[in-house]
Image: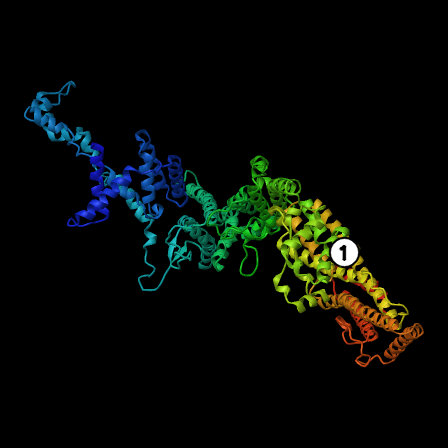
Amino acid sequence: MAHLAQLGALADDLVAAIAGIPETQRGRHNASRDFVVRTLRTHTFTRTNHFDVEARLRGLEEHFSVVGRDGLAQALRDRLDALAPHRNQTSPEILHLLLELADQPAQKSKLSDLDALVEPEEDAPPPLTWRDIAREDGWKNERDIWRFVDYAPGSSDEEEADIASEVSLETLTTASSAEDSCQRTAADLAIQPQGDDLLKQIEQAQSWRYASSVDVDGQPTKVPISTLQFLREALFMIAGLETSLFDQHCTPIAKYQLQGVSWDAHKALATLFAECGRKLAPLRAFSKAKEESPLLQVFQNCLQKALRSLDLLLSSIQGRFVAIKEDVVVSLIGVLEELGPTLSPLYDLAAIVRRLQEERNPHAFRYLELLDDAVGMAQLQGSQATFKLLGTIFFDCFQVYLKPIRLWMEEGKLVPGDRTFFVSESQTKLPLQQIWKGQFNLRRTPEGNLHAPRFLNPAIQRIFTAGQSIVVLQHMKRHESTKKYRASTEPKMDLETVCPPGLELAPFSELFGAAFQAWIQSKHHTAAATLRELLFSSYGLSESLDALEHIYLMSDGARADAFASSVFRHLDTLSSSWRDRFTLTEIAQEAFSACVDSYRLSAEVDPRAVTYHGTAAADARASVRHSLPAIRLKYRLSWPVQIIVPDEAIRSYQTIFTFQLQARRALSVLHRRPVPSPPHSTTPAMARYYHLRTRLLWFCTTLTTYLTTLVLAPNTSLLRAALRDSAGVDDMVAAHGAFVARVTAEALQGQRLRPILEAVLDVFDLAVRLADAQAVEMARAREEEMEVSRLSVMSSPFKASTGRRGGGARRRVREEEEEEDGDGDGEEGGWMAGRGDGEGRPHGVVMRELLGDFERHLRFVVEGLRGVARASREEAAAKWDLLAEMLEVGIKE
């Protein structure tokens, strides 16, 4: 009950502090209080993770040190150490609450606020002095105690009395009080004869700073200074301190001049020293600036180390002239020569900083490019000191840039919020098959350049591929197998390792490139090889490619004919059942079941390409353009295989499949057994029909042979070899993409060959029109024979026989007249065809027109292939020229 009472009181305070409900609304107050109590009693929240709290505190301490708040970091560490012996089970919750309440502690915290936590010390009691003791014990009144007795021979009582009278209580207690001596100030100590002289010497030595530069006549004059004074001021100026001889811009002040030196000589010396300070000024200013990027922070740290080395050298030089123990020569030129080897590398660093400040919105890694150029230039100039310093700084800074690269190549992760790394992640999660191409991308500048240092451009793609391989392996749950190859095989990236002794003449760029390639290879090879092996062994890449070849490239002619013949049979009978995707899928699975996994195969008809009207169905049957392109075969691939064979490649496969299906349609109608012709039907029209049929068969067979033997088979072999020799997924994707591009171009499916492809499809349509025209003519001939037979039965045998011979003779005469009068519309003959080109037109005229169309299309195809092959530099041009030679045989002279 006591716990519930305490909890209720706390709930009352919480409601009053947060809700602010007036006292008049007691019902609302009680409802809120009951809700709070019920929530607190039945809460299911877990305890604070004390490991996470410790990690956040360590990270906060490290953050304070990185941003330059070392005092704040030390204060935090001291208080955490003091808290350690007093921790209990509620300490993590309290610390977690303080961390959640913190608001930019690195910027808003003040160390002076900690003084308010120190309890004021109690006023110490006044020190005990001999004067106080003498006053309390009554020694002041007992003067005999303070008598000084001189035991030397010859002293008298009077002398002793005189001496005792001279020694008073005040002098003894004052002289013997240690506390009083400690209370004396520095001013009391300075007011001594020797201190006064020293102060006067210092003031006299510095009097030149305040000397007037105007003589008694009011004319300007120069204030003379000694060489030692000039040197001290010059060293202070180089160290970045304020001086009297140089202003804040490191410009010599004209009122001072070296003793015994002409003005021109003084001006030249002052200018030399001023130029040193002026060159180092940007370096010191940049090293003190506040930077947020870790890349720039480590660069600042390296600059501070280099400047610290210079300051130590300046201090050692000053030390030689501060406490001079023997005669020394103060030489300004000698000091400049002594500083030269140290200042020269710093000048190059200052030039890099100056270029960074002059450029507009430089990238955080821009200084790495400038350092790389400067290191290479120092090596070419033979400046070993500059090469060593700049090289060391370059690799120290590059280690920070390597951290996101290492994280990407080992874990497939990106640093959140990092805009300096050249890999970016899509904001939306894409399907697994699109991870390789769409989930991660390379950052580029508005000009289209890679957002990365120039010296890394040759290796960017390999780094990007390695990280992508890790991401894919993580989705495959196979990433654990590559973790054991990490730190043990990573080569060092420092100046001593990259540029060892003995290779001084080798260019720095080549040495760095070789070392960095070895560093990448130590991380790239394992992931790439593992992913490649998994694609072939676990995910059936080879089997999937075989299935695509059987289905889309029709590598098995028997299976392809089984599928095509079923589809063509439905087309010829004008049956709409083939448009049903279930029927079409059943046909496809039955045809290809022996060579592919039938459960992965499906088929459909694009509804936009098919019209369900009777006349449209007849048109679809009469042309290879109307129905066959609407047939879509789909073979489901596993998502890792879809990385190698994307949807764009499947669309290209579908294009090749449609083209081969159209060619098989033409061959199917040409190979169909012709209707037996009636006796005495050998006419010029029939001869022309057989001639045209033979030439169409030759054309379709030649084109099919070209596709099979010169396009598909060689390129398929090249693809298998390229996949077998590929080192990674990128190489495999590129190999398959090149295969699809070659096959598409060589199969006349390119945009430049579109008119030629249309002419080829016109030839395929000629085959269908020829079969339809011949069917119409044969039907008409059978009807005529049946009519003649009927009339012969009704007449006498002699008349019937005469009538039959007369009918055949009349038909031959009519056909001969049609041959001579080929431009007639055929209506005078009275023979009407039922469908196709023969409708209402004589058979001979139709055959002549079809033959003329074939010769025209054939010439156009041959000449077009020749022209495109000569005007193109593509690899497929040789194949086009070869196809033109194959088809040129059929051109009629």
**Outermost residue to the right:** 798
In this rendering, the answer to whether 72 lies above or below 130 is below
Q: Between 212 and 261, which is closer to the camera in this rendering?
A: 212
Q: Between 357 and 473, which is closer to the camera in this rendering?
A: 473
- What residue type is disc 1 on? Val
Position of residue 100 in the picture relative to residue 117 (left or right): right
Q: Quadrant of residue 492?
A: top right
Q: Between 786 and 46, which is closer to the camera in this rendering?
A: 786
Give the colour scheme shown. Answer: rainbow
- The residue beneath circle 1 is 711
Name the spot of residue 156 as percent of width and height, x first. 10, 20
Name the spot of residue 583 as percent of width and height, x first. 65, 54
Quadrant where the image shows the N terminus: top left
Quadrant where the image shows the C terminus: bottom right
Q: Quadrant of residue 6?
A: top left
Name the spot of residue 223 as percent of width and height, x first. 37, 56
Q: Secondary structure at mark 1?
A: helix
Q: Between 201 and 380, which is closer to the camera in this rendering?
A: 380
Residue under the point 17% across and 34% down: 123
Crowding at label 1, few (<14), some or many (≥20) Cα neighbours within 10 Å? some
Position of residue 655 in the picture relative to residue 691 (left or right): left
Q: Is residue 52 visible?
A: yes
